[in-house]
Amino acid sequence: MGALVKLVDAILFLFFLVVAVCAPLFDAQACLPEPLFPRALVDLSAWYAARVGDYLVAEKPLFFVGLVWLELLFLWPLSLLNLYGILAARPWFGTTCLIYGVSAATSMVAIMSELTGSGKASDNLLMVYFPFLGLSLLAFLRGLLPCSTKITSTISKKPALARKKRA
């Protein structure tokens, strides 16, 4: 079980690292003014939207902008905390991972519902978003796992009785 948890932590570390870098650089372009970003990042985002056919990034519907705000204000700081939690083996990592997983999975279900229901999404676009749904569910499940495989006993031994003095 310990090796599986280490593998999941390694996968989640890479996922949180991608989120920590991409959220402020690329996702923020959906809700912040374009002049705030270097031209190269704006061009890269436009190239991605055209290449993959990501109409959510290109058209910026209001529900998507709201989910990006949620990611920037709530999920991005949590991803930074989770990176630190994994590296420092903090006991609260499971809790923050659970919170991240639930929130990200909820957002991804809304996005995936739009993509599959609209009929506009190509298979290529779905293949971009499905891993994020899977990784958010993995974060959710990791939050449910115990942080340590050691079993500690809550039963304490009774202290030894003191001897009475005899006179």
Image (spheres, helix red, strand yellow):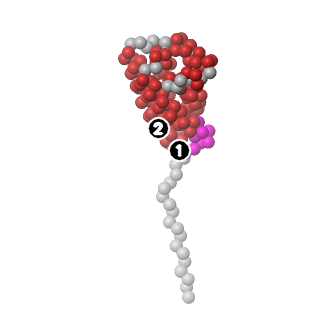
Q: Earlier in the sequence, mark 2 or mark 1?
A: 1
Q: Residue 69: x percent and y percent?
A: 48, 30
* Badge 1 amino acid: Trp
Local crowd size for mark 1, using a 10 Å CA cut-off: few (<14), some (14–19), many (≥20): some
Q: Main secondary structure of the magenta part?
A: helix
For the point 50% across and 60% down, the residue is: 156
Query: Residue at horizontal 42%, vertical 23%?
Result: 62
SS type, badge 1: loop
Quadrant the C terminus occupies: bottom right
Q: Local crowd at mark 2 within 10 Å, few (<14), some, or many (≥20)?
A: some
What is the distance, in whole Å, between disc 2 and disc 1 at their CAs?
Answer: 11 Å
Return the residue nearer the eye: 149 or 51.
51
Which residue is at the far left?
117
Judge whether residue 99 is colored magenta: no
Range of the magenta residues? 83-91
Q: Position of residue 153 (x, y in %)?
A: 50, 54
In the displayed structure, does residue 61 sit left or right of residue 19? left
Give amino acid for label 2.
Ile
Residue 32 at least partly seen: yes
The numbered dot on residue 99 is 2
The residue that disc 1 covers is: 92
